[in-house]
Amino acid sequence: MAGRTKNEGGRTVTSTISVEFCGEWFRVAEGEELTIGRDADLNVDDDNPYLHRRFLSIVQVETMWWLVNIGSRLSATITDGTGTMQAWLAPGARIPLVFDVTKVVFTAGPTTYDLEIHADSPQFERSPSLDDPVGETTVGSVQLTASQKLLILALAEPMLTRESSGMSAVPTSAQAAERLGWPLTKFNRKLDNVCDKLDRMGVRGLRGGPGKLASNRRARLVEHSVFSRLVSSEDLPLLDQAHDVDED
C-alpha cells in the first residue's frame, strides 16, 4: 500500500491510489506506474485484439497522480463518482486524478470495459449543496423523447444490469432493434437523431464520417448516457413497454 505523502496542519497524510476492476483491487506504489490494457499490469482482457496491449497508465508526477492515454487509437470517457463531470481522454491526453472516485469506461471492438480509480486523500472534495441532483435526476438539460430513451436503454442494458465494474458487450443495431420490437430502419433513424442531438450539445465521439464505425458510435452513446445519468438501471422496466410507445 503506497502513495504520495503531504503535510496538512503539521500531520503527514498518505495518499493511496487504488483501481477496482471485476472485484479485484490493484494499488499503485509511490513513484511507480500502473498500466492498463491487454498485456499490462492490469490485464483487463487478453483475448480482445482490438484493445491496446498498454492503453492507459496511472503515474505520479511530483505531488499529483495522473491518468494518461498511452494508446494510439482508443479513447476513454472519464467521470467523477457523481456523474456531474465528464471528460474525453483521447490518445496522448492525460487528466489529473483529483476526485475520491474516478470512473473510467472505454470500448475496444465489441466490448465495453469500466473500472474505478479510488484516492483515499483526494485533491478535490466537492461540497454538496441543495441544488445537487438526486440519484434519479438526469444531469444536464438533455430532453429525450420516449423512443430516444428506449433506444439508449436497449443499447445500455448490458452495462446497466451489471452490478459492478467489469466488461459488457454493446448490442448491435439489429439486436437492439429486435429488443425493442422495431424495424431496423426505425432504429437507425432514431439513432441518427439522438446522436445528432447530443453532438450539437458538445458530446464528442458521436459524429459519423471516415473511420467512424457504427459500433464506436453506439459504444460512445452508451458511455455518455450511463455516466451522465441520462439513463439508469431504474429505467430498465421501460424496455418491456417499448412496443406500446408511439412514433415520436
Image (cartoon, rainbow, N blue to C red):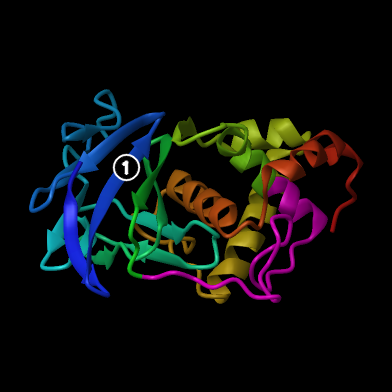
The residue that label 1 is drawn on is 19
Image height of 161 relative to 225, above or below? above
Q: Is residue 43 magenta?
A: no
Residue 243 at x, y = what percent?
Answer: 87, 37
Dominant SS of magenta comes to loop
Neighbour tally class for label 1: few under 14, some 14-19, many 20 plus, Cα within 10 Å? many
Kindly identify the residue that appears in the image at 52 percent across and 37 percent down. 170
Q: Is residue 22 visible?
A: yes
Image height of 96 relative to 200, above or below? above
Residue 5 at x, y = what percent?
Answer: 17, 61
The region drawn magenta spans: 124-151
Kindly identify the residue that appears in the image at 46 percent across and 60 percent down. 80
Image height of 22 relative to 14, above or below? above
Q: In the picture provided, is 33 more to the left or to the right than 69?
A: left
Q: In the picture provided, is 178 more to the left or to the right than 212?
A: right
Image height of 205 relative to 214, above or below? below
